[in-house]
Image (tube, helix red, strand yellow):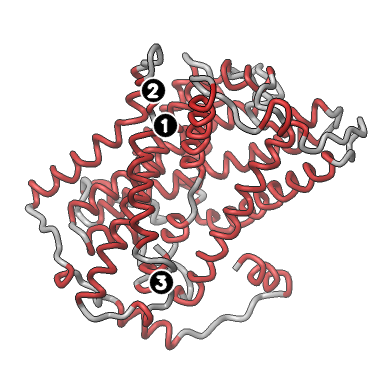
Amino acid sequence: MAEMVTYLPISSPFIRFAGRYVDEAFGVAAGYNFFVFEAVLVPFEIVACNVIIHYWSDVVPAGGIIAIIIVLYSLINIFGVKWYGESEFWLALGKVILIVGLIIYTFITMLGGNPLHERFGFRYWRDPGSFAEYYKTGSLGRFLGFLQCLIQASFTIAGPDYVSMAAGEAENPRVVLPKAYNQVFVRLTAFFVLGSLAVGINVPYTDPELANAFSKGLPGAAASPYVLAMTRLKIRVLPDIVNAMLLTAAFSAGNSYVYCASRSLFGLALEGKAPCFLTRCSKSGVPIYCVIATLLISLLSFLQVSNNASVVLQWLVNLITASQLINFSVMSYTFICFMRACNAQGISRDSLPRKGWLQPYAAWYALIGCFVMTFVGGYGVFLPGQWDIPTFLFSYTMIGVFPILFVGWKVLKKTKWLKPEEVDLRGNVQEIEDYTRDFVEKPAGNVFIKYLDKTFG
């Protein structure tokens, strides 16, 4: 993505590149898949907020909290969107502080810096051990346990697609975006690896309270394993602070997904790939009907009223993971077509603003890996005694919807699968080159902003 987007930084790039470098129908299917992916993340975050809130009290029923959050999202995205960018910057900074703080907390407490003065170190790596059995016993069970972790990791990995979505609005994108992609890769790798390591240090996977939280939807540990570890070590106040920051992060993420999903649908409507009434905006420029459509999907969060939170979260995770993997498959194949077009049209990759490593082999590896994992995600329902219709539908719906959208649009519009020499690689490029040549960087407003710009790119 970095190579394509820095060459031609436009809004909603990987969706539009799919139509521009592969086939218009391919871009339509990718666009709707990305919209569903973003939109379903909204009810996921709403359910997560509800779980966290019930850590303190269950006086307000789940349905009431869900309704309040949806109303707040409606108000923010319809009337307060002008503060979206600024607020998301500071909230994102809070998330970075949170994860760094939890990693430091883990390091201090594991060495005995806790009220119990207990140096537990890597105790849980020995007992119960680092590899859990899942579904089966022995080596097969440990492999299935690892596979389940890999499936969960597929849900959490995101970043390049979000950086890409901002390409059309970024200042001096050919200079800024390569740095942003590099930093996203480094930060995600560091935070995810260290965060996973910290969770394994703090809590064993056999912990009964943790198991009950995920099987019965109980609050506390389900909100954060760190809170469980803090409670066990008799640490006061900090669990409330952590949960409050997690609640802010979850609420902020849900609000961000409402914004991204509505704009994705708006982009499809502007290109004539969604009903034209979705292009109507309020006086402040908010695509009101796109926001409403996104919030209607958020009503899936009310599934929690008749099911426990852990079950609903897992359903939503299954749907989101499938869409996410389809997104990455689309990106990988689009890049392969982009490379073929560059070779056919005599454009050297050495002339691009950013050149990726190990290409096209890395792209083929990503395509095959993501494509296979898309089908593996819900494998559990096919094991003896594990069949569950909701789990099957949430795991495999988008796998069926994507080809239907592709074939349907291709037949309806009679689109053409583009040959490498037919791909448009030069449209809009000259405008970007002129903008980059004439760009004059604005000085930072003060020392603090300058420091933040340097630190966070």
Q: Earlier in the sequence, mark 3 or mark 2?
A: 3
Residue 377 x, y percent position in the rendering: 40, 33
Q: Is residue 251 above or below residue 367?
A: above
Callout 3 crowding tier (Cα within 10 Å): few <14, some 14–19, many ≥20: many
Residue 156 in picture, x, y percent from top left:
51, 43
Q: Distance between the residues labelled 1 and 3?
A: 32 Å
Query: Is 196 drawn above or below residue 84 in the view shown?
Result: above
Q: Which amino acid does label 1 sit on?
A: Asn
- The residue nearer to you, when weighing 298 against 141, is 141
- Element at label 2: helix
Which numbered disc flags the more N-terminal residue, 1 or 3?
3
User: In the image, which disc is placed on residue 318?
Assistant: 1
**Residue 282 shows in the view:** no
Instruction: For the C terminus, give its image quadrant.
Output: bottom right
Q: Which of 331 and 280 is in front in this view?
A: 331
Give amino acid for label 3: Thr
Residue beneath the point at 35% across and 21% down: 382
Image quadrant holding the N terminus, namely: bottom left
Q: Distance from label 1 to label 2 (Cα)?
A: 8 Å
Q: Are marks 1 and 2 in contact (CB under 8 Å)?
A: yes
Q: Position of residue 129 (x, y in %)?
A: 68, 30
Residue 170 as seen in the image, left or right of residue 405: right
Q: Circle 1 — which element?
A: helix
Q: For the point 49% across and 54% down, which residue is it?
A: 159
Viewer can see residue 251: yes
- Tell me, for residue 260, which label it has, or none: none
Of all residues, the one furthest to the front in this rendering is 139
Q: Mark 2 points at which residue?
A: 391
Label of residue 6 in the image: 3
The amino acid at mark 2 is Thr
Residue found at x 49% / y 20%: 135
Q: Is label 3 in a helix, a strand or a loop? A: helix
